[in-house]
Image: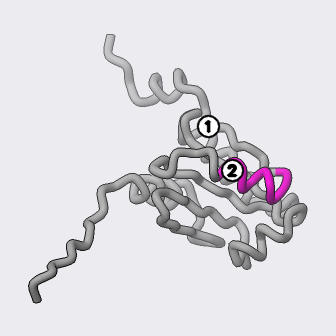
Amino acid sequence: MQKTADDEASERSPATSHVIKSVRNFDEYISSVDTTTPVLIQFTAPWCRRCTTLKKEIADEFDSSLHWLTVDVSEITSLQERFHVTQLPRFDVYCSGRTDSVEAFDANVDAVGRMLQAATAARPTLELIDDF
C-alpha cells in the first residue's frame, strides 16, 4: 500500500522550538549549530495571538530536524534591539552568513518555508579575474 503525504506527515515528529532564556543562551546556541544548517528564529511576545497561531502551524508543517529558536522580546529586549525587531510576528533565517527575515502581515508558514529553502539553495560565487 502506497503512503500518502498525509500519512507521512502524521508519522514524522513535529518541529519543536527551543525557547531562548537569555542573550548568552542565544549566542551559545547559534555558535553550536553547523553554519550551513538554517536556523529559524521566531521573535514573539505573549500578547501576540498571531505569533501563537504561527508557532502551531510551523510545528505542524516542519519536522523535528528544524533548528527553531523562539525569542520572547518582552523578556529579552536586548535581542529585540540587536535584530531591530519592530513588528510581530517576525521570523529570521540564518545560514552560511546569510540572513532573511519576514515580519508582520507577510509572516506565514509559506514564507518561512521559502526562506528555509532559499537558505540552503546553491548560490552563485563571484570569481575574481586577475588579468583585466
> Which corner quadrant holds the C terminus?
bottom left
Residue at horizontal 64%, vertical 52%? 30
> Where residue 86 sits: x, y (%)?
73, 78
Residue type beneath disc 1: Ala
Q: Is residue 87 visible?
A: no
Which circle marks residue 69 in the picture? 2
In magenta stretch: residue 33 = no
Residue 10, located in which quarter of the rendered image?
A: top right
- The residue type indicated by label 2 comes to Leu
Count residues near mark 2 (Cα–Cα under 10 Å), then give few for <14, some for 14-19, many for 20+.
Answer: many
Q: Is residue 29 above or below residue 12?
A: below
> Residue 68 at x, y = what percent?
64, 47
- Between disc 2 and disc 1, the foreground one is 2
Q: Where's residue 39, x and y in %?
A: 57, 51
Identify which residue is drawn at 63% across, 41% down. Answer: 59
Q: Is residue 115 at all visible to an observer of this figure? A: yes
- Left or right relative to 65: residue 42: right
**Is residue 28 left or right of 111 when viewed as pictured?**
right
31, above or below 132, in the image: above
The residue that appears at 65% across and 72% down in the rendered structure is: 104
Q: Which residues are magenta?
A: 21-30
Q: CA distance from mark 2 to mark 1?
A: 11 Å
Task: Give the numbered dot on residue 15.
Answer: 1
Q: Secondary structure at mark 1?
A: loop
Q: Position of residue 95 (x, y in %)?
A: 49, 57
Number of marks in picture: 2
Dot 2 falls on a residue whose secondary structure is: strand
